């Protein structure tokens, strides 16, 4: 049972909701009956958290956010789908995260340690990894997958079912209508790959060997006129460096499952 002193008297918290005793809830917030909130999570004024929603520990949810509402999908027929969010996320004002649909996983999943700025929309069945930064007005359509350590610039729209690979950087006001390979920097409308996300990789502590392998993968994909299959095969040679194996396998696995093509 949550401590009464941490719940503002104007907040409406359903008695069936499961809130850790250290959760705080601001004025006029509404918490639905199927919501679970972990330790030390704070919910700002006028937030609405509803649906089958589970949120972990140490999250900071700012005012006016709407989390766990029904998906914006005409096929949705009231199935008990879910929204699950991990720990230590910052969710700024006016964000909207929807639950999943029965036509997919039935769950929208957001990892941990994400920095999610104002007006971000995460639609049904999306998967957002850990340590991402989604700048103001980023819009993820349904079924989008965002890898770990991705940065997405403000006012960017991501088409349904697209994937953004780990460590990628998407520039301001981009239109993402193809998969974005890991480690790359892309921007524009039409979307184009510009370079390796070098600054991001250095900030993540990538060694010179790993960065060299990523640079070579970029050349194979974008500078040598190879088909996607040929570029993937040529990447095998980069596995001779033990430190690069995990990154090469990440890239090859991503490319092998690119059902809608990659950003070129």
Image (cartoon, rainbow, N blue to C red):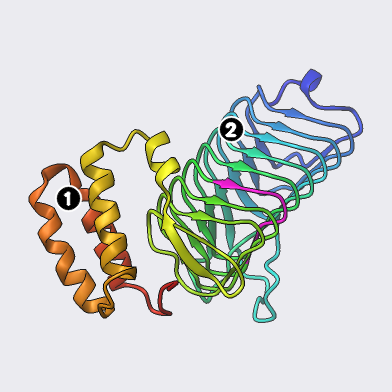
Q: Is residue 176 left or right of residue 92?
A: left
Q: Is residue 22 above or below residue 94?
A: above
The image quadrant where one finds the C terminus is bottom left
- Percent coordinates x, y for residue 153 in the rendering: 62, 53
Where does the magenta region start and end? 133-140
Q: Which residue is mark 2?
A: 38
Residue 255 disc label = none
Q: Which residue is mark 1?
A: 245
Q: Residue at x 63, y 28 (%)?
A: 20
Quadrant of residue 90 within the rendered picture: top right
- Percent coordinates x, y for residue 64 in the rendering: 82, 45
Q: Is residue 8 above or below residue 148?
A: above
Nearer-N-terminus badge (1/2): 2
Question: What is the crowding at mark 2: few (fewer than 14 residues within 10 Å), some, or many (at least 20)?
Answer: many
Nearer to us in this view, 205 or 68? 205
Q: Residue at x 10, y 60 (%)?
A: 237
- Percent coordinates x, y for residue 242 in the rendering: 11, 44
Question: What is the crowding at mark 1: few (fewer than 14 residues within 10 Å), some, or many (at least 20)?
Answer: some
> Is 31 included in the stretch rendered in magenta?
no
Measure the C-alpha gap from mark 1 to mark 2: 37 Å
Residue furthest right as drawn: 10
Q: Is residue 96 left or right of residue 179?
A: right
Q: Nearer the viewer, mark 1 or mark 2?
A: 1
Q: Residue at x 58, y 65 (%)?
A: 100
Nearer to us in this view, 258 or 91? 258
As helix, strand or loop, the secondary structure at mark 1 comes to helix
Q: Is residue 38 above or below residue 145?
A: above
As helix, strand or loop, the secondary structure at mark 2 comes to loop
């Amino acid at each position: 049972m949550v401590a009464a002193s941490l719940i503002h008297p104007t907040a409406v918290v359903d008695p069936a909701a499961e809130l850790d005793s250290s959760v705080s809830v601001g004025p006029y917030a509404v918490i639905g009956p199927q919501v679970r909130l972990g330790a030390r999570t704070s919910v700002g004024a006028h937030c609405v958290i509803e649906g089958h929603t589970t949120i972990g520990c140490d999250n900071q949810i700012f005012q006016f956010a709407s989390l766990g509402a029904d998906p914006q999908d005409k096929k949705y027929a009231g199935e008990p789908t879910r929204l699950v969010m991990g720990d230590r996320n910052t969710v700024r004002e006016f964000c909207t995260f929807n639950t999943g649909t029965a036509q997919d996983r039935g769950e929208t999943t957001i990892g941990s340690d994400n920095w999610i700025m104002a007006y971000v929309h995460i639609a049904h069945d999306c998967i957002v990894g850990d340590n991402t930064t989604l700048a103001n007005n980023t819009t993820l359509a349904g079924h989008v997958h965002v890898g770990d350590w991705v940065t997405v610039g403000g006012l960017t729209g991501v088409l349904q079912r697209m994937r953004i690979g780990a460590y990628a950087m998407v520039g301001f006001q981009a239109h993402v209508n193809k998969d974005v390979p890991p480690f790359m920097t892309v921007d524009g409308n039409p979307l184009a790959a510009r370079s390796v996300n070098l600054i991001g990789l250095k900030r993540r502590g990538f060694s010179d060997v790993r960065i060299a392998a990523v640079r070579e993968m970029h050349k194979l994909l974008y500078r040598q006129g190879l088909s996607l299959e040929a570029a993937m095969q040529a990447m095998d040679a980069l596995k001779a460096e033990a430190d690069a194996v995990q990154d090469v396998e990440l890239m090859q696995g991503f490319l092998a499952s690119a059902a809608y093509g990659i950003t070129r």
